[in-house]
Amino acid sequence: MAQYPAMGAAMGVNPAMRAASADRERAVDVLRAGFAEGRLTQEEYNDRMGQAYEARTYGELHALTRDLPVGPVPMPLAPTWQPAPVPGTNSMATAAIILGCAEFLTSGLTAIPAIICGHIARAQIKRTGEQGGGMATTGLVLGYLALGFGLVVALAVVMLVLNRGGGPYPGPQG
């Protein structure tokens, strides 16, 4: 009667843990498949099957099936590696770029909200690691450009009014 050493910690479960009847049946199924594929002789199959029904621990069952391609049974599946989820786009950054682009339709009325949303978005992105930094910056740039353009237009209007007729007050009529 051949002895098969237990694998131990590499199994993923405690090899000393008691096996259930269902675990023994799964091991016998693996042995049956190995015999049907010609991987075990009749004598090896009978010997291992008897040992499987007498096995008390996972380690003993693993030792009986570890050299078969179906793999050691029972053994829990190892967790598969999954990449970390990519954080979504910051909603304030989306609002900043929408408000920044809307300035062309609203004659600059959305410039200040675009600037506010852009600054809030950049702070949130720095804190949470979300995406959308480029959208927040674009909203800020468009907001500041519209605000600057509005100030230049306002100054031009004031200068035009002041220079019209020499000043804001009518001169002496004579």
Image (spheres, rainbow, N blue to C red):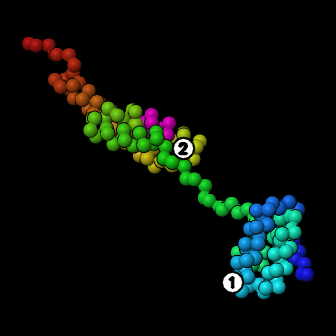
- Residue at coordinates 85% horizontally, 74% vertically from top-left? 50
- Chain part drawn in magenta: 115-121
The residue lying at 26 percent from left, 38 percent from top is 105
Percent across and percent down for residue 155 are: 29, 30
Question: Can residue 71 be seen at all in this image of the molecule?
Answer: no
**Near-viewer residue (69 or 12):** 69
* Relative horizontal placement of residue 122, taking residue 97 as reference (left or right): right
The residue at 82%/85% (across/down) is 43
Q: Which residue is under mark 2?
A: 125
Which of the two residues, 145 or 140, is positioned nearer the viewer here?
Answer: 140
Q: Which label is found at residue 165?
A: none
For disc 1, the neighbor class at 10 Å (few under 14, some 14 to 19, many from 20) is few
Question: Camera-side residue: 111 or 85?
Answer: 85
Q: Position of residue 12 (x, y in %)?
A: 79, 63
- Name the amino acid type tagged 2: Ile
Residue 116 on the magenta segment: yes
**Within 10 Å of the Cα at label 2, are there few (<14), some (14-19), or many (20+) other Cα atoms?**
some
Number of marks in picture: 2
Q: Quadrant of residue 111?
A: top left
User: Left or right of 167: which side holds 83?
Assistant: right
Question: Quadrant where the C terminus lies?
Answer: top left
